Amino acid sequence: MLRKLRLALHKGEELRFLSHLDYASAIERMIRRSGIKMAYSEGFNPHMKISFSSALALGITASAEYCDMDVLEEGTLEELMNRLSEAAPKGLEVLEGRFMPDKVKKMMAICNYAVYEVKGPVTEEVDWVSLLEPFNSAEEVLYEKVTPKKTRTIDVKHFIKEPLVATVDNGMVTIRMAIGVYPEGTMKPGDMWKLGKEQYGWPVTDSYSIHREAILIETDGACITPLEVE
Amino acid sequence: MIQLDPSWLQHVEKPARYMGGEWNSVAKNHSEVDVTMAFAFPDVYEVSMSHLGIKILYGIVNERPDVAAERVFAPWHDMEAEMRNREIPLFSLETKTPIRDFDLLAFTLQYEMCYTNIINMLDLAGIPFYGKDRDLSFPLLIGGGPCVYNMEPIADFFDVVSIGESEDWINEFIDLYKAEKEKGFPGGKEAFLRKAAQIEGTYIPSLYEPQYTESGDFAGMKVLAEEAPAIVKKRIVEDMEAAFYPTKPVVPYLDIVHDRAVLELFRGCLRGCRFCQAGMLYRPVRERTPERLVQLAKEIIANTGYNEISLMSLSSADYSKLPELVDMLMEEFKDKQVSVSLPSLRIDAFSIDIAKKVQQVRKSGLTFAPEAGSQRMRDVINKGVSEEDLMSACENAFKSGWNTVKLYFMMGLPTETDEDVAGIADLAYKVLDLHREITGKRNGKVTVSCSFFVPKSHSPYQWYGQQDVEEIHRKQKYLKSLINNRNISYHYHDGYTGYLEAVFARGDRRLAASVVEAWKLGCKFDGWTEFFNYDTWMQAFKNTNIDPEYYARRNRDFSEALPWDHLDDTVSKEFLRREWERAVDGTLTWDCRRKPCNGCNACPELGTPIIDYKEGGRVEKVTFGLT
């Protein structure tokens, strides 16, 4: 019997520098080690049927990253989660799980709201509330997004969903950014940091690290996690 | 412990190369062990992690509760710059401990072109290059791997060298080190090295002093201590069946060069190709049983989560129980989505049948190594493969759906003429024509890949002067002029790398200064075409008064002392000489596995017979050594 298992996984410091492909293959190997029978795609080159809530870039840790697996095995949720935990590498934790209804939508298609914390050293002490004010109250902020293929101008405010909040601790500032992830694109948290530094005079450097606090599904201003989907 | 801050580490290429923490990696608390050891491979992570030898030794040493074994590889250029900039010394992957703080630092020497990387890594670690400049407050520098058989060019850097297979040696050596460390090393480093010299298979370079004639030729080794044997004989693992095998190898996060489980079927190869050093070094053939191999395969797959297992050996298709093994593995893994791959194929129809079995769906490409273009040349090198063999292998492959064939050749072999070179093009055309004949299609593809022959120590060509580089470049162009078909692609490297390899493959201790000089002038990662700098190397030789031609190109006299005569792989010099003479005559020497002994001397000298499970295990027959 095929069951859709949705898991919340913690991607910790030890896995920070895995690209999405490396991360996916680490998860696949974890599943294989756990011995849990999985469904595979048909064809010349069968692939394990797993999918993720997003493609987390190299350099980003995540409080929770979600993974869907097509499981061909009996057993309770707790048993399966335990088997996976035993096979999990350092830095990866199986946090929560749920068997999902058969027709559940792919997470990639519905996850549209990500909360990041970008942290780096400050070069001078400032009042961050007033420093962030101009950006937070602006109607429109234009930014030239450069990709290997093309350069285009986007309105950052279309993607930044909540006012930016800064917390300073021991010479390090952490900026919380809630960013929309849409079919037409998104704003990278690193680009937001750069924009703050270059256009709003944030006293920061090119040194920073990114943590994703949440990946959510937002509908009319209300957010739920992928595990809460009906 | 070194702290790596992600805020800068994220800017280097593939930071996971330096992170450690992979599944099955072992991080022990150094305060709870007696000895700490770092295994080093002088190349980038993806290359280093693909090497079986380190997996074996890392496993063996970490099984001991009293030793912590960790890994260290060459940082890539960008990381090296960051480390130098931030004054971060070379560190281990497991516990990020500075390499300088380990008791033992063991390098595996897989190819000559890594020597400047060793120097660079020592420099990054803050360790003096020459053994004589290090007291026991520095790690002892240990060498192992195939290049140790002629490591003379870099011998002065090393304290201790393991000749041959190190599985048993490493435990004996660590036992001695641990005991002496507990006693506080009475007598200091030299006393310790003299004790170590008495462990079989140990070469202590500082206890040997090369002698030279007035004209500057190598004249022999003077042994400086009574504990040091005049001839250091290699160690081997006789019983592969009982030998340790790493069933919990470290599983990398990065996509490394060979990113799959590895099953070593057997050691040694007795085909006797005359250009091949490995075919001499690893004698005799010693197999594992298929039952043991299947057991190992099951454990490795369960412990790693790999979905592919590669059957590895010098010549895997020569494994006597290959069809049985492949059937057993396919049966074992049929519902587990684990595929089996065979990296090297013998040139015959039988091999294709096996390949068909293991590659049921993906008909990627087949690779064959005829090594030479003409039958005459193949007989000279004792390849023992005919055009008919190649055609029947290709016929079978094309009938079974393959369309791409890759052919490997060498250029610059002894006695080679333009006719032999033209034979390479002929073969490529014949294979392509055969494809058209069989399939009626024009989508066949033949890739011809040509390397420049490097004469190696301990092979029948150890006396042969390498061909002139410019002559090789002329032959490369000549061959190119003969290949005018868009379905045949022709690849070759410039000859300079092969030339430098030839200098070091048969060099002596006077070359150490050139290695350091080349490094000072900026050479590193010489095995990488994009970083290899021939002119800088020539400058380094000039600055150190070394004539590279003397090492690479000179035909050596049979009566001459050779710088590696004291490092014994057990194949006798007389046998090599006879093979050289038979090569010149184009006379074949058979594979002795199921035929009478050829007298290479390995079996009687080691007291180990060929172990072949088609023949019931230990092959008892009369063996001898030519003298």
Image: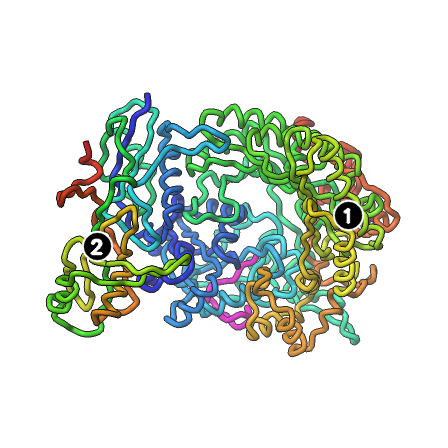
Left or right: where does residue B27 sit relative to residue B504? Answer: left
Instruction: Give the structural element (helix, strand or loop) at label 1.
Output: helix
Dot 2 falls on a residue whose secondary structure is helix
Quarter placement of the N terminus of chain B: bottom left
Rendered image: mark on residue A158:
2
Chain on which label 1 sits? B
Q: Looking at the image, is B313 positioned above or below residue B87?
A: above
Q: Nearer the viewer, mark 2 or mark 1?
A: 2
Tell me if I can see residue B40 in this picture. Answer: yes
- At 51% from the left and 49% from the top, the residue drawn is B54
Q: Which residue is drawn at the image coordinates 19% and 68% (left, top)? A: A171
Residue at the top extreme, as displayed: A1
Cα separation between marks 2 and 1: 64 Å
Amino acid type, label 1: Ile
Q: Are marks 2 and 1 on the same chain?
A: no
| Pointer 2 local density, CA inside 10 Å: few below 14, some 14–19, many at least 20 | some
Q: Which residue is at the far right?
A: B585
Residue B399, given in percent of the width and then of the height, sits at 68, 29
Q: x%, y% of residue B89?
A: 41, 67
Number of numbered labels in the structure image? 2
Q: Is residue B134 magenta?
A: yes
Q: Is residue B293 left or right of residue B472?
A: left
- Residue nearer the viewer, A136 or B133: A136
Residue at the spot 86% in from the left edge and 51% down from the top edge:
B584
In this rendering, position of residue B430 left or right of residue B401: right
Q: Residues within 10 Å of mark 1 (few under 14, many from 20)?
A: many
Image height of B147 relative to B431, above or below: below
Image: magenta residue range? B127-143
Q: Which residue is mark 1?
A: B424
